[in-house]
Image (cartoon, rainbow, N blue to C red):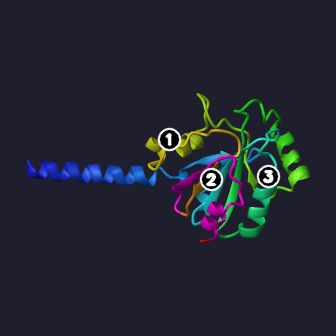
Amino acid sequence: MKRTLLLTASLVISLFTIAQTNNGFHQFTVNTIGGEPFALSQLEDKKVLVVNTASKCGFTPQYADLQELYEKYGGDNFTIIGFPANNFMNQEPGTNEEIAEFCEVNYGVTFMMMEKISVKGEDMHPLYQWLTQEKENGVMDAPVSWNFQKFMIDEKGQLVDVVPPREKPMSDKIVNWVSN
C-alpha cells in the first residue's frame, strides 16, 4: 500500500513538473507578419512586451511610443512583439502586407510584428488563450479589453503583469519593469 502511494505521489509530482514546464510563453510558435514560423522559445532570457495592435484606433499613435521603448531598451534583455488584431470595431481591416507597410511608413516600426490574429472570442489564438486565462498562465485572468493592451512576460516565459490599453508604453510601470 505504501509503495503504491509513493509511486502515485511520484507520478503526480512528475506530471505537475511536466505541466509547469510546458505551460509558459516559450512553448508557442507564431507566424511573423511575413508568414514565417517563429518559436517564442528563441526569446528565453528576455523580457517581452506583447501588444495587440490596430492601425485605425485612437491608440494607434502608441506605435511611436512602442518604437521609442524598443530603441531605448530593446536588445539582448528585452523585446516587443506586436500582434495586429481586428477584434475591436474593425480597427485593423488590413492584410498582413498592408499592416507591415503602415507600421514601417508611419511609425518606423522595427520591433517584431506578427501576423494578424484574433485576441478574443471563439477564434482566439492559443497564445492569447494562455495570456488571458489564469487556468492557462497560472497567474491571472486578463481578457483583452481593447487594442494596445500590453502583457509583460519575464525571462522565464511567465506572465508578470498586464498594462491597460490607455497606459502608454513609456509609462513608469513599463520602463521600471524593463530597466530592472
Look at the numbered disc 1 and give the secondary structure of its residue: loop
Between the C-alphas of marks 1 and 3, the distance is 26 Å
Q: Which residue is mark 1?
A: 133
Which residue lies most toward the right here?
105
N-term mark: 2 or 1: 2
Q: Picture coordinates of residue 110 (x, y %)?
A: 81, 58
Residue 63 numbered mark, or none: 3
Which residue lies most toward the left here?
1
Q: Contact, CB < 8 Å: mark 1 with mark 3?
A: no
Look at the numbered disc 2 and give the secondary structure of its residue: strand
Q: Picture coordinates of residue 40 (x, y %)?
A: 61, 54
Residue 159 on the magenta segment: yes
Q: Is residue 31 above or below residue 26?
A: above
Q: Which residues are magenta?
A: 156-179
Disc 2 crowd, CA 10 A, few/some/many (<14, 14-19, 20+): some
Q: Is residue 63 above or below residue 177?
A: above
Between the C-alphas of marks 2 and 3, the distance is 24 Å
Q: Which is in the foreground here, disc 2 or disc 1?
A: 1
Q: Picture coordinates of residue 41 (x, y %)?
A: 58, 57
Q: Picture coordinates of residue 148 (x, y %)?
A: 70, 46
* Residue 100 in the figure: left or right of residue 145: right
Q: Which residue is mark 2?
A: 39
Which residue lies most toward the top here?
122
Residue at x 64%, y 70% (from the top left corner): 179
Residue type beneath disc 1: Gln
Residue at x 81%, y 32% (from the top left corner): 93
Residue type beneath disc 3: Tyr
Disc 1 crowd, CA 10 A, few/some/many (<14, 14-19, 20+): some
Residue 128 on the magenta segment: no
